[in-house]
Image (cartoon, rainbow, N blue to C red):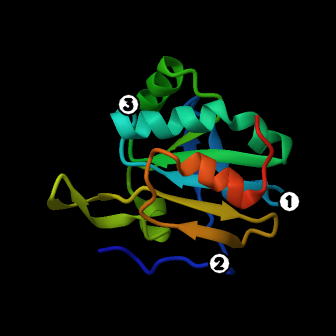
Amino acid sequence: MTDARLAPGDLAPDFTLTDQEGRQVTLSDLRGSRVVLYFYPEAMTPGCTTEACDFRDNLNSFASAGVRVLGVSKDDVDKLKRFAERDRLNFTLLSDPDLEVQKAYGVWGEKALYGKIVVGSIRSTFVIGPDGRIERALYNVKATGHVARLRRELGLDAA
């Protein structure tokens, strides 16, 4: 169901997706900067809201280190816009309705949800270096505490 998982050193699969404002964002256009690319199951659900607000509240520490944050889900652009407005999200959300990017990163597949096996987005985060290579590939992360762990691992100062 999922493509092979990515590992540090792999070239990050390139993509072009539409953001919450209707603009096209191409990953390779961001070369020269570090990028945190995080995948979440669905906008406006409790866990995804917790994670997004955590990124929002800590965005200054990422930005001051020159790190861009991009969130990806299967949600359409209109839902992403509502999510960003509702929670005052200050970073880019990308729509992947065809699941092509999620499959390329190995984050679409079987997962446990409330004790049942379902197919969906596996909450995962990638740190992509300025050269376009994966520095960290974190699969099955928890919504709570994930951003703090990422900041510690990246050596980012408090916001």
Q: Is residue 145 above or below residue 31?
A: above
Q: Is residue 141 above or below residue 109?
A: above
| 123 on left or right of 93 | left
Residue type at tag 3 = Met
Q: Quadrant of residue 18?
A: top right
Q: Which mark is residue 32?
A: 1
The residue tagged 3 is 44
Looking at the picture, tell me which residue is in the foreground, 15 or 137: 137
Q: Nearer the viewer, mark 1 or mark 2?
A: 2
Q: Decide: marks 1, 3 in contact (CB < 8 A)?
A: no
Residue type at tag 1 = Gly
Q: Residue at x 61, y 54 (%)?
A: 149
| 33 on left or right of 40 | right
* Alpha carbon distance from label 1 to label 3: 32 Å
The residue tagged 2 is 8
Q: Residue at x 65, y 80 (%)?
A: 10
The spot of residue 131 in percent (x, y) is: 81, 70
Who comes first in sequence, dot 1 or dot 2?
2
| Residue neighbourhood size for the residue with mark 2, other residues' Cα within 10 Å, grouped as few (<14), some (14–19), many (≥20) | some
The spot of residue 90 in percent (x, y) is: 65, 28
Q: Quadrant of the C terminus?
A: top right
Q: Residue at x 54, y 76 (%)?
A: 6
* Alpha carbon distance from label 1 to label 2: 17 Å
The spot of residue 92 in percent (x, y) is: 62, 38
Q: Say if residue 65 shows up in the picture.
A: yes
Residue type at tag 2 = Pro
* Alpha carbon distance from label 2 to label 3: 30 Å
Q: Residue at x 40, y 29 (%)?
A: 79
Looking at the picture, tell me which residue is in the foreground, 35 or 146: 146
Q: Say if residue 13 shows up in the picture.
A: no
